[in-house]
Amino acid sequence: MASDWVGSLVSIHCGPTLGVYQGQVSSVDQTSQTISLRHPFHNGVKCTVPEVTFSAMDIKDLKILDFHKNLNDIPKQNGPDPNSTSIQHGGRKDKGGGVPVNIAPVTVPNKTETKPQEEGVSPVPHYSKSYGDRNMDMTVQSKGFRRRHNSWSSSRAPNQATPKKNGLKNGGHMKNKDDECFGDCKDDVPDEDFDFEGNLALFDKAAVFSQIDSSERRGNGARSRGTPGEQTQSRYRHDENIIEAKPVVYRQITVPQPGTKEYSTDSGLVVPSISFELHKRLLAAAESHGLSLERRLEMTGVCTSQMALTLLGGPNRLTPKNVHQRPTVALLCGPHVQGAQGISCGRHLANHEVEVILFLPNFVKMLEAITSELALFRKTGFTLVSNVKDLPETPVDLVINCLDSHENGFLRDQPWYKTAADWANQNRAPVLSIDPPVIGQAHAVEAKWSLSLGLPLPLSEGAGRVYLCDIGIPQQVFQEVGIKYHSPFGCKFVVPLHSE
């Protein structure tokens, strides 16, 4: 009889729209073809109503999970449930396509025999699943999908153990991993949303910051670190957190005969200027110790080319992808040591893919240093001109001036010198002078930058901004000529100097 199924735990599949319901049978009405469940679960979630009634025309599949079980009595055995019976829609259909409720068997089959109690009902093997499973279709499990679902573990008796896996792949009560992780906390989920604004209002931000400020004022502006018993430490900026063993001495270079000007580096070190006579004595002492003219020319060429590459744009301009905008440099050299320094600089610039145009007038007799530097420069394949008319008419990127000599001031009266100086002044390109003359000698070419070697000479305002180049003179060589010297270069070979 239908009343025999009252109290059983069943699962009712109502199609994809209504979903799956589980619960305990409270009543079965054969006349109206309805079945009612109390304490129902819909797709694994507990319903808010105490009882749900289903019509036979809405039921697609009905499975009996436990026969005559109370709601809190969950199976404890590890093997297949002997009372488990599955009734699928395989028998007589009504007009609505549902399953008649009165086709349920009256007796419960045992382990070895399963007999349908009415025609049209076929036994189906039972696949044990947790009571709160959302989908009872085993095809989902066979495809490897994992679904998070709630379980009846929250309704389990306090002394009831959790069923363990029995190693059966498609049978037995196998506890899903999601049930073990999330099943017991189902009833702990709050029904109301968390009030973030109300909780934030409980934090008195003004009082907390006032307490922090008062604690800092008590510590004389120092914030305590570590345990309260530790001594407070002063706070420093990133450029002040340096332990100083002794006060910094900014005048580390002294000369026997101070020049008329003094310079300083970016770090504040004082660099005095020296006279041209002391400068010649310093270079002679360096050459006597092996720092020959050729080595000084090479060092000067490297440092000058590095400065020129920076002025031309550096890595922003000299890239493999920028071959159509290579910078152009015009070198104006005279028949002296300063001219040889410019030729050495031009060779290094040419090696760095800079378009170099070297101007050097024809002379019957030249210095040996100029001859050797010219031989190396010709190997670069760039232009060498002896007439100012062959220089570019359009502005170049940079002009490097090496026309002047410290010892021979009569060159300024030569026609080639005047025409070259006029071209440089009219080209509207910035000018870099290498080792320019001292105060008292006129500057035919107004320079934007000037590069001094070793120690600066007292230069006039026409020399522009002064830079200092390290040409590799050892400290003891400075001491031989009476100069107390400490290197002002730091990690660089060229440093800017500021007039005091």
Image (spheres, rainbow, N blue to C red):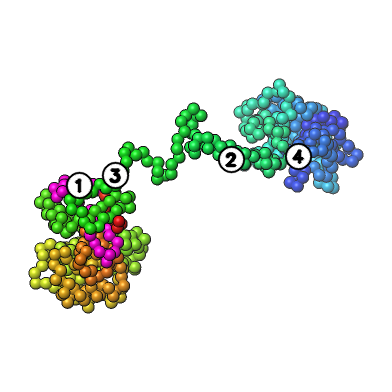
Pointer 4 with pointer 1, Cβ within 8 A: no
- Whether 315 is drawn above or below 97: the answer is below
Q: Nearer the viewer, mark 4 or mark 3?
A: 3
At a point 25% along the width and 52% down the height, the residue shown is: 271
Q: Which residue is mark 1?
A: 484
CA–CA distance in space, label 3 to label 1: 13 Å
CA–CA distance in space, label 4 to label 3: 84 Å
Q: Which residue is mark 4?
A: 42
Q: Nearer the viewer, mark 4 or mark 1?
A: 1
Point out the tag, 4 or 3, that comes first from the N-terminus. Answer: 4
Q: Does the magenta segment cover residue 469? A: yes
Q: Nearer the viewer, mark 2 or mark 1?
A: 1
Span of residues in magenta: 458-487
Q: Which residue is mark 3?
A: 249
Q: Secondary structure at mark 2?
A: helix
Amino acid type of disc 4? Answer: His
CA–CA distance in space, label 2 to label 1: 55 Å
CA–CA distance in space, label 3 to label 2: 43 Å
- Whether 181 is drawn above or below 295: the answer is above
Of 196 and 450, which appears nearest the observer?
450
Q: Nearer the viewer, mark 3 or mark 2?
A: 3
Q: Secondary structure at mark 3?
A: loop
Point out the tag, 4 or 1, that comes first from the N-terminus. Answer: 4
The x, y position of residue 31, in whole percent, is 91, 39
Q: Which residue is mark 2?
A: 209
**Picture quadrant of residue 346:** bottom left
Of 87 and 14, which appears nearest the observer?
14
CA–CA distance in space, label 4 to label 2: 51 Å
Point out the tag, 3 or 2, that comes first from the N-terminus. Answer: 2
Q: Secondary structure at mark 4?
A: strand
